Image (cartoon, rainbow, N blue to C red):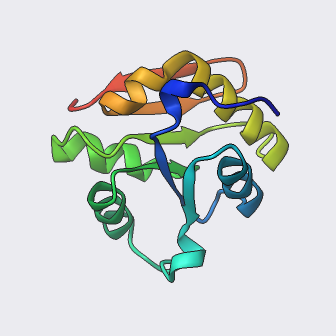
Amino acid sequence: RGIAPRCCMTMKFLADMGISISTVNLLVQLGYSAVHVKEIGMKQALDTEIIAKAKNEDRIILTCDLDFGDILAASGDKYPSVIIFRLENETPTNVNKRLTQIFHESSISLREGAIIIAEEARHRVRLLPI
């Protein structure tokens, strides 16, 4: 596991239904503010409602759903940032490993407003607004 870089400590997260509670627990253990939509009664929420919640609370969305990127790109908004996991292996262990790598390589982009597509061997960053 490793410690989150100091520059990332102010980041807060909102995990969508496709993300494991264990990923949220890891983020909390690392000192982040992280919640799962299920924990806050948003299990059935529309993507636009999740985006609004994340924007209002200055949270980064964690998801496996490509629709979030499409909605944010069409909105012209700069926030919230979203990390979209497009992994062959979507086990919590692998998601957590990729998330840690993204923190180390792209935390500035996340804080500035970005859509990050996380794949097995790399991640792509698109700064918002698109």
Q: Give coordinates of residue 108: x percent, y percent.
A: 41, 22
86 relative position to 43: left or right: right
Question: As drawn, is 53 to the left or to the right of 3?
Answer: left
Residue in front for this viewpoint, 55 or 73? 55
- Report the quarter where the N terminus lies: top right
How far across and how far down the image is residue 107, in percent? 48, 25
**Along the viewing direction, whichever of 1 and 62 lies nearer the viewer:** 1
- Residue at 38 percent across and 72 percent down: it is 46
Q: Residue at x 76, y 45 (%)?
A: 90
* Residue 112 in view: yes
State the image quarter where residue 129 is shown. Answer: top left
Residue 110 or residue 74, whichever sits in front: 110
Residue extending furthest left? 76
Count of number-bearing discs: 0
Q: Picture coordinates of residue 10 (x, y %)?
A: 45, 40
Of residues 69 and 61, the one drawn nearer to the viewer in this rendering:
61
Q: Is residue 88 among the parts visible in the rendering?
A: no
Looking at the image, which residue is at 59% across and 76% down? Answer: 39
Indicate whether 106 appears above or below 100.
above
Q: Is residue 97 left or right of residue 127?
A: right
Q: Is residue 71 left or right of residue 45?
A: left
Q: Quadrant of the C terminus?
A: top left
In terms of image quadrants, where is residue 121? top right
- Residue at the image point whose x is 33% and y is 59% from the top: 57
